[in-house]
Image (cartoon, grey):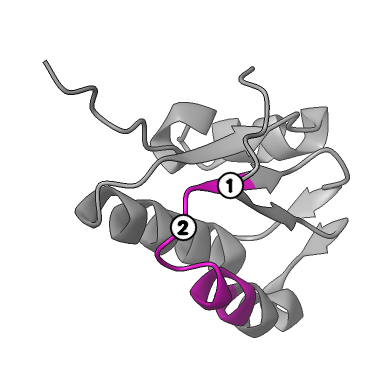
Amino acid sequence: MLATKAEDAVLKLPAVLDLQAAAALREQLLSKRGLPLRIEAAEVQRLGAQCLQVLLAAQRSWAAEGLPLHIDAPSEDFTGALKILGLAQADLEHQKELAQ
């Protein structure tokens, strides 16, 4: 895991990411748009498909802008839910390409 840089935005996910949390998650992510982002997932106990869709859309947006997006310290429940839904943590992340 990389150390958080001062210029990285941080978003701490709540314990429950269900249908009711999807709109708030979307708004929180939009407020971080244009910045390198670290999403702290240590507290997540439940991840629903709607919030997963929001996180996947964020990954695509950050990738399109060429900005890094990382999931930090995912809980076992978070990674387990991803696995059940056919994804892995890497599917939600984007590494900024290094200039050669």
Q: Earlier in the sequence, mark 2 or mark 1?
A: 1
Task: From the viewer's side, name the closer residue of 75 and 4.
Answer: 4
Left or right of 50? Residue 57 is left
Crowding near pointer 2: few (<14 within 10 Å), some, many (20+)? some
Residue situated furthest front in the rendering: 6
Q: Residue at the location (57% across, 31% down)?
A: 83
Q: CA distance from mark 2 to mark 1?
A: 6 Å
Start-end of magenta stretch: 26-38
Task: From the viewer's side, name the closer residue of 92 and 67.
Answer: 67
Q: Amino acid at mark 2?
A: Leu
Q: Secondary structure at mark 1?
A: loop
Above or below 34: residue 12:
above
Q: Is residue 74 magenta?
A: no
Residue 36 image position (x, y, % from top left): 47, 48
Q: Residue at the location (83% across, 38% down)?
A: 42
The residue singled out by tag 1 in the image is 8
Q: Amino acid at mark 1?
A: Asp
Left or right of 56? Residue 75 is right
The residue singled out by tag 2 in the image is 35
Q: Are marks 2 and 1 in contact (CB under 8 Å)?
A: yes
Location of the N terminus by quadrant is top right
Q: Is residue 84 visible?
A: no
